[in-house]
Amino acid sequence: MLLVSRSGEIVACNRKMGKLIGVPPQALRGRFLFDLLSNPSTVVEEYLSACSRVREIHPGSLTLACPSEERIPCGAQGYVVEPGGESRPALLLLRLIPKSESPSKFALLNQQVDRLKKEIMLRRQVEETLRIMDRRKDRFLAMLGHELRNPLNTINNAVFTLKRTGSDPHLQERARAIIERQVQQMNRIICDLLDVSRITQGRMPLERERVDLTQLIEQIVEDQRWLFDEAGITLTHRTPETPLRVRGDVVRLNQSICNLLHNSRKFTSGGGKVSIELEEWEGRAFIRVVDTGAGIAPDRLSALFDTFAHEETHQDRKHGGLGLGLPLVKGLVELHGGTMELLSEGEGKGTEVRISLPLERTLEES
Amino acid sequence: MTLQEEYILIVEDDPDSQDALAMVLEGVGHPVVCASNGREALEQLHREPEACLIMLDLMMPEMDGWEFRRLQKDDPKLAQIPTIVVSALGDSDKRPNGDVVGYFTKPFDAQKLIEAVAKIC
């Protein structure tokens, strides 16, 4: 290996190079590359010029002319380690590898350099991604604080009333009921957050058993109908006449479907409609939850699956929330070997969520 | 509530939050009317403009607190009604521009809120 100036003057060389030529390394300092090579000086000059222009590793072929008169054809790799200035020439690092040596060594060096370059680029991409994730996490934590402050405030006010109402049983009951509901709300937020965290880290164990989706959905609809009636939303459902079985965790499947219905209810005004449909097709169970609610702008669709990408857009600001529901449901569905799609024609045009799950194939049908 | 009796308007979308705040204010003798979003609040104020104070949440569906404030200030009949913003948003750069008479970040001290309200109504 040699360090040469653009003009060809040898600035330094290593012991291996000296040994190859048959001259002590220090004796080469100050000499010119043109004297060490048997190539015409125009060829050498052109090579040095190309190395300075290209600014990355430039391959070539040069032949060493040793004092012993031996000629050693070499593969050359030259690149600029220090660009030149007005008063000093550029410095080039030049590797010369005898072609008689393992021919793959030259290729190996090229590969190593390529690999290093790719690693550097990858590292830069990873750093940029980490920076984005970091900013999103900060925003997420801010929103988490915001979401928990609301129920805390309500509980606080209810406790204040309890302290002041003395023996008025109606006010006391009103305050007590508020506290109970808000504690449940906080619990839901925290549980959702922990679930999403567990899924992200691959630490969500599933208790799998045979689950009849027909029965599950019918039960959920029956349990939740009163919530929709109260909100003035028409809830309809369509399920097959026979069981539709999957192998899954009934609690998590329940959680997923309830989550989707909760979202539809939250984003649909009174007078609107929500439907949940279950059918079998080509060996899979398909669940569709469709609403006539607020809909989703096209540029937000993919971000909704990302836990930390909940932006403070106009729509998010109006509805608040951490946006944990969809990433959580998607994570749970995928753990079951399923897929989830979110569709909307735009704001004000309703939303459709489509889930598919693999059916349990059994030889025994009751 | 009789006509032309001054009342406090609570604008807040969460029913429990509405109720809990209403109980705090009614507990010290203020008549209270609740609206679930900015649009309902404007309708209420046009029907019965005798509100002595508006307690305004910011993040609400249909019409949020920022939009309500803008429309309130544009309406000469409503612009002068004092407004206290009550919100979980802590960032001061997200607050509505100027001239609200108070800003309470949730969770707030109910006693301090009562004292602030007493100076207005």
Image (cartoon, grey):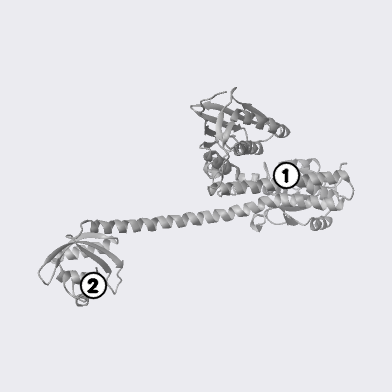
Query: Which SS class for mark 1?
Result: loop
Residue A258 visible in the current orientation:
yes
Q: Residue furthest front?
A: A364
- Report the front residue among B49 and A36: A36
- Report the front residue among A276 and B2: A276
Identify which residue is drawn at 59% across, 54% down.
A139
Determine the image quadrant of residue A290. Answer: top right
Mark 1 burial class by Cα count in 10 Å: few <14, some 14-19, many 20+: some
Q: Chain of mark 1?
A: B
Q: Amino acid type of disc 2?
A: Arg
| Percent of width and height locating residue A259 | 62, 39
Name the side, left or right, on which A321 lies relative to A335: right
Query: Which SS class for mark 2?
Result: helix
* In the depicted structure, whether residue A218 falls above or below residue A330: above
Identify which residue is drawn at 51% across, 54% down.
A132
| Percent of width and height locating residue A32 | 18, 72
- Report the front residue among A223 and A121: A223
Name the side, left or right, on which A153 lies relative to A140: right
What residue is shown with label 2? A15
Q: Chain of mark 2?
A: A
Query: Any mark on residue A58, and which?
Result: none
Camera-near label (1 vs 2) is 2
- Whether residues under marks 1 and 2 lie with C-beta atoms below 8 angstroms apart, the answer is no
Q: Amino acid type of disc 1?
A: Asp
Question: In the picture, which quadrant includes the N terminus of chain B?
Answer: top right
Q: Do the dots labelled 1 and 2 sit on one chain?
A: no
Name the side, left or right, on which A192 lies relative to A19: right
What residue is shown with label 1? B14
